[in-house]
Image (tube, rainbow, N blue to C red):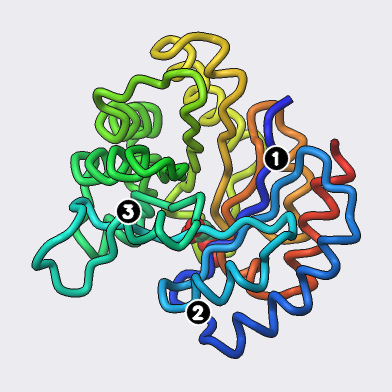
């Protein structure tokens, strides 16, 4: 069975004190749960990764970065590299988030470079893809998502033991309160899994977790997770509240 990942992307929210208090409230609760194949994960901002790793130490909570440089070292002011993230003991990193694409000129090609930098360090990339509203309205969703996959995963050979996670986040559903319906999300997830199967084989496709992101909250997560190709959520706003985060994890446990 695939991992069911409940991932909180905190974006540019929570400073040191808030990171600590969230984790001090949530980690003891997670320690009491029988999580099975459910993986809880949070992605705080860079300065607080160490604190998050410390608070999550020896617990089931995984910690992720929100981005990584496409280069390993050198004169790139403000950048954080994959070897630096690996040196923290981090296991996961989000790449290609639509906000990075929109505000920081990330492209499929630069996502692809990041992907390899992470894999070289043994980190698991969480690769975000998704169409804009204009692209959906033009009937281009499948074309856009497949071209993001082709570009972002270019030259990738998924050998056994190499893990990646895909997150489908329709841009029009992010932070808008307008969640994709389970049918809309499932349709695209099935397209993604089919492409993975054709490209890497059925065993890779059946083991790869594909997360949905875009206005996921405690009220709507169950119907999304019930879809056969949705293996978790990449959650922004609703992951910032301890109780909502725990509620979504409990919903996921209830479905396993
Ligand atoms: P919201 O859950 O706030 O819509 O954000 C989704 C997202 O972008 C997660 O990466």
Q: Which secondary structure lies at badge 2? A: loop
Task: Answer few, some or many: residues within 10 Å of disc 2's Cα (few below 14, many 20 plus, some between 14 and 19).
Answer: few
Relative to the observer, which residue lies in front, 83 or 180?
83
Cα distance, mark 3 to mark 2? 22 Å
Is there any visible trace of residue 176 in the rendered image? no
Rendering coords of residue 45 (x, y %)? 45, 73
Q: Residue at x 38, y 54 (%)?
A: 97
Q: Which secondary structure lies at badge 3? A: helix
Circle number at residue 13: 2
Circle number at residue 4: 1
Rendering coords of residue 67 (x, y %)? 36, 59
Earlier sequence position, callout 3 versus callout 1: 1
Is there any visible trace of residue 240 in the rendered image? yes
Earlier sequence position, callout 3 versus callout 2: 2
Circle number at residue 82: 3
Tell how many labels. Answer: 3
Rendering coords of residue 142 (x, y %)? 39, 27
**Ligand 1: does it lie within 8 Å of the C-beta at label 3?**
no
Earlier sequence position, callout 1 versus callout 2: 1
Q: Residue at x 39, y 49 (%)?
A: 133
């Amino acid at each position: 069975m695939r991992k069911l990942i409940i991932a909180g992307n905190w974006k540019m929210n929570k400073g040191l004190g808030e990171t600590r208090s969230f984790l001090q409230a949530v980690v003891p609760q997670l320690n009491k749960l029988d999580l099975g194949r459910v993986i809880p994960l949070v992605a705080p901002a860079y300065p607080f990764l160490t604190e998050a790793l410390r608070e999550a130490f020896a617990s089931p909570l995984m910690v992720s970065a929100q981005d990584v440089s496409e280069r390993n070292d050198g004169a790139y002011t403000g950048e954080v590299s994959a070897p630096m993230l690996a040196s923290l003991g981090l296991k996961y990193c989000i790449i290609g988030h639509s906000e990075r694409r929109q505000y920081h000129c990330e492209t499929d090609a630069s996502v692809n470079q990041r992907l390899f930098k992470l894999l070289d360090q043994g980190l698991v990339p969480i690769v975000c893809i998704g169409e804009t509203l204009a692209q959906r309205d033009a009937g281009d969703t499948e074309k856009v998502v497949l071209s993001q996959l082709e570009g972002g995963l270019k030259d990738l050979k998924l050998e056994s033991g190499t893990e990646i996670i895909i997150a489908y986040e329709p841009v029009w559903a992010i932070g808008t309160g307008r969640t994709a319906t389970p049918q809309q999300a499932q349709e695209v997830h099935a397209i993604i899994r089919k492409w993975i199967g054709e490209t890497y084989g059925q065993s890779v496709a059946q083991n790869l977790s594909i997360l949905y992101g875009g206005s996921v909250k405690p009220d709507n997560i169950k119907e999304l997770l019930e879809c056969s190709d949705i293996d978790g959520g990449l959650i922004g706003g609703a992951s910032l509240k301890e109780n909502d985060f725990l509620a979504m994890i409990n919903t996921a446990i209830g479905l396993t």
